[in-house]
Amino acid sequence: MKARTLKRTKVNVVTLGCSKNTFDSEVMMAQLKANGIAVDHESERGDHNVVVINTCGFIENAKQESIDTILSWAKAKDEGAVEKVYVSGCLSQRYAPELMEGIPQVDAWFGTRDLPRLLKTLKADYKHELVGERLLTTPAHYAYFKISEGCDRKCSFCAIPLMRGKHLSTPLEQLVTNAKGLATQGVKELILIAQDLTYYGLDIYKKRNLSELLAQLSDVEGIDWIRLHYAFPSGFPMDVLDVMRERSNVCNYLDMPLQHGSTKMLTRMRRGITQEKTEALVNTIREKVPGIAIRTTLITGFPGERQADHDSNLQWIERMRFDRLGAFTYSHEEDTHAFGMLDDVPAEVKEERAQEIMELQGGISLELNQAKVGKVFKVLVDKAESGHYIARTEFDSPEVDNEVLIPTEGNHLRIGDFADVRITEAREHELMAVVI
């Protein structure tokens, strides 16, 4: 009689959305590996019998991409390419009851804080001793570093609190331990992420404690760069700037989504700040940390945005001259405060306004980049492709900001190494450079 063999579980994790989802997938993969389960990230080999899709549900485009991905894997299951399809993350947290009816091929749905339940479904145990352990999906020299989960803000357009829950800080000591672990693996750059970095510590220390966290992380041997993503302007802890100025490995870089330059629109968005206070904050940041690069994101077409508001926004952008800027069209999300407003800006107008903002910013970026020609910068080499090393200065985050292109011919740089370069040419979002 032929013995029956059981096929070994092999998981393919597919990640959609933001860097916070990337972090969550890396934690999930470490837990699976520790349980003896083979796991890959976005593998194309086709030898996996289980797929876990970590979804995004932030705005309409992201939701549609997540749904399309789920449908694609549902079809793969129908065709016998995989045996099990599991869905986790923000979209699943918020819309699982509606989606499970239309996509019965999905074997189970999990929310943003359901990792132990997902592991149990895969016949794995959640190992508490692994807290902080991850299988990095980024290049080995940098890592996204989530310091808290959830958000207590009441922005009228945002569904994040519905999907991620209330703000929950990770204890400082645990974060320092995690950073030391990453440093021993060769990570040189920590990119701090959260729904709101500036709220860090309020829940467990009863004060905004980001500055102390930064100081302790900067003491970790092997960490050469620390950069801050997703800071909230209202209630910004100014002592963070002191640490940034005093510690050489805290990058002079701040990602602070401001959403709009009009006080009227900021009020409708429930941002808790005015144009005047925003400008004063940005000016103070620039005074306290000379040369800092500020990245922001803006929303176009929010309910009630008139042409005059958009024109005012453009004038404000011209005046503020942000180093980096992204513009997104408003997405009308159920159960948010703004959902009760009339979504009265046509889709094509939203797009036109976003394009106008990006065209304006393109000119500003080019001017700022041209001022760098002839200057020397320290860069971190991320990869090599098409005859160039692709590197970044401390003023640039991976994937979203400027790149520095260095010819591979005649140079021998290693991925993950730092180099000093002189800028020879500037474009809107690229700098050409030579090694010195």
Image (spheres, rainbow, N blue to C red):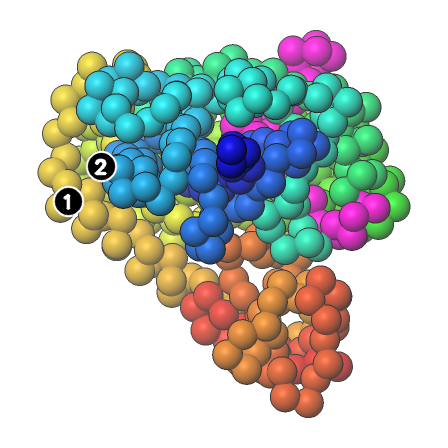
Q: Residues within 10 Å of mark 2 (few under 14, many from 20)?
A: many
Disc 1 marks which residue? 349
Question: Tag on residue 301?
Answer: 2
Compute the Cα span from label 1 to label 2: 7 Å
User: Furthest residue to the front?
Assistant: 1
At 32% from the left and 19% from the top, the residue drawn is 96
Instruction: Judge from the rendering whether residue 62 lies leftward or rightward of residue 213; answer left or right.
Output: left
Taking the magenta stretch, the answer to whether it contains residue 264 is no
Three-letter amino acid code of the residue under disc 1? Val
At 88% from the left and 46% from the top, the residue drawn is 221
Instruction: Judge from the rendering whether residue 370 lies leftward or rightward of residue 75; answer left or right.
Output: right
Name the one closer to the observer, 411 or 128.
128
Whether 123 is drawn above or below 360: the answer is: above
Name the one closer to the observer, 24 or 191.
24
- Residue 197, given in percent of the width and then of the height, sits at 60, 29
Find residue 246 and report its image quarter.
Answer: top right
At 83% from the left and 38% from the top, the residue drawn is 180
> Along the polypeptide, which appears first: circle 1 or circle 2?
2
Q: Are marks 1 and 2 in contact (CB under 8 Å)?
A: yes
Tally of marks: 2
- Residue 332, given in percent of the width and then of the height, sits at 23, 27
- Residue 169, given in percent of the width and then of the height, sits at 65, 19
Three-letter amino acid code of the residue under disc 2? Gly
* Magenta residues, start to end: 183-207
At 38% from the left and 53% from the top, the residue drawn is 318
Instruction: Judge from the rendering whether residue 340 lies leftward or rightward of residue 429; answer left or right.
Output: left
